[in-house]
C-alpha cells in the first residue's frame, strides 16, 4: 500500500476521474474536490502530501489557493492547467507551486512529476541524510533545519523556489551549475521554458540578496552556462 495522500482539485469531472483513476492504479490514497473553498478546507484538515491543482476553478483562481496554502505549508503543489502561457506558469511557480503540467497531459507524465515531488518531499522531511544543518558565507546564514535564510543578521523572505535555488547553489558553493542541472534539480526536467523561468527566479532572488547586503555579490552569472555561488 502506497502511504502517500494526494489532494486532487479539479472542476472538470472527466479530468478529475482520469487523475483519481490513475492514482488508484498506483495505490495512492487521494481526496478529490471541485472548487477552491473545498480545496483549502481539505488541505487544512487532511494535510495531504501533494496537491494536484487545476488553476481554472469556478469560485477561485488557483494561484490564490497556492498563496493561501503557502501561508502555512510547504506541501508540494503541482499545477495542472490548460493555460500554457509563460506568464501564467511563472505566476503559479512564483506563488509557490513546485511544478506545472499543461493539459492535455499523459498519465505517465503525471505520475513521473508526482514521483519527483515525492522524492523532494522525502528529502525535505529529512528521510535522506543531510550532512550539514547550517551554512555560512559572508553575512549569509542558512538554517537548513528551520528552512530560514538570514543576511546581515536579518531573515529574508524567499518563495519556495527561490529557497530551493539558494540551497542548491549553497550546497555546491564554488561550482558553476549549468541551467540544465539547476532546472532538473528544481523541476525534475529541463525544457526551454524552464530555463526562461529560471532566469526570472534567479533575478528576483539576486535582487532580494542585494537589498539586504550590498557589499557582497553571492551569485555569479556565467552567461550561456549557468550560475554559481562564490565564497565571499
Ligand atoms: Ca478547470
Image (cartoon, rainbow, N blue to C red):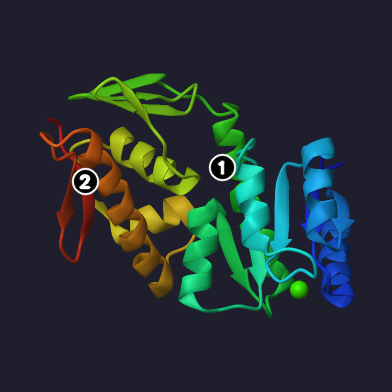
Quarter assignment of residue 104: bottom right
Q: Which residue is mark 1?
A: 120
In this picture, residue 223 sits left or right of residue 32: left
Label 2 within 8 A of ligand 1 by Cβ? no
Question: Observer-nearest residue: 76 or 2?
Answer: 76
- Label 2 Cα crowd, 10 Å radius (few <14 / some 14-19 / many 20+): many
SS class of the residue under badge 1?
helix
Q: Residue 126, how many percent across, how many down?
A: 57, 26
Q: Position of residue 167 (x, y in %)?
A: 37, 37
Residue 36, above or below 194:
above
Considering only order in the chain, which callout, 1 or 2, is on the residue closer to the N terminus?
Answer: 1
Element at label 2:
strand
Q: Which residue is mark 2?
A: 228
Q: Nearer the viewer, residue 87 or 2?
A: 87
Question: Is 84 situated above or below 142?
Answer: below
How far is the residue under mark 2 from the one under mark 1? 22 Å
Q: Which mark is residue 176?
A: none
Residue 118 appears in view: no
Quarter holding the C terminus is: top left
Q: Quadrant of residue 47?
A: top right
Residue at the spot 79% in from the left edge and 65% down from the top edge = 59
Count every numbered label the image shows and give the total: 2
| Residue 160: % across, % down | 49, 44
Q: Is residue 60 visible?
A: yes
Whole-percent x and y of residue 159?
46, 45
Q: Assess disc 1: are there few (<14), some (14-19) or many (≥20) residues with their C-alpha within 10 Å of its C-alpha.
A: some
Amino acid at each position: 500500500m502506497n502511504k502517500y495522500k494526494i489532494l486532487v482539485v479539479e472542476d472538470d469531472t472527466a479530468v478529475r476521474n482520469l487523475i483519481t483513476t490513475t492514482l488508484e492504479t498506483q495505490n495512492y490514497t487521494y481526496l478529490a474536490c471541485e472548487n477552491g473553498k473545498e480545496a483549502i478546507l481539505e488541505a487544512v484538515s487532511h494535510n495531504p502530501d501533494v496537491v494536484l491543482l487545476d488553476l481554472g476553478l469556478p469560485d477561485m483562481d488557483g494561484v490564490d489557493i497556492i498563496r493561501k496554502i503557502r501561508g502555512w505549508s510547504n506541501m508540494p503543489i503541482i499545477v495542472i492547467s490548460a493555460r500554457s502561457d509563460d506568464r501564467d506558469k511563472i505566476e503559479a511557480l512564483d506563488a509557490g507551486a513546485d511544478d506545472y503540467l499543461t493539459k492535455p497531459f499523459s498519465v505517465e507524465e503525471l505520475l513521473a512529476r508526482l514521483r519527483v515531488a515525492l522524492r523532494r518531499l522525502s528529502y525535505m522531511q529529512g528521510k535522506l541524510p543531510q550532512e550539514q544543518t547550517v551554512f555560512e558565507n559572508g553575512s549569509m546564514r542558512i538554517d537548513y533545519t528551520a528552512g530560514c535564510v538570514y543576511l546581515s543578521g536579518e531573515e529574508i523572505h524567499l518563495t519556495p523556489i527561490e529557497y530551493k535555488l539558494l540551497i542548491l547553489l549553497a550546497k555546491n558553493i564554488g561550482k558553476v551549475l549549468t541551467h540544465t542541472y539547476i532546472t532538473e534539480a528544481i523541476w525534475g526536467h529541463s525544457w526551454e521554458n524552464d530555463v526562461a523561468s529560471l532566469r526570472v527566479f534567479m533575478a528576483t532572488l539576486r535582487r532580494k540578496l542585494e537589498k539586504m547586503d550590498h557589499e557582497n555579490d553571492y551569485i555569479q552569472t556565467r552567461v550561456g552556462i549557468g550560475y554559481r555561488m562564490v565564497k565571499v
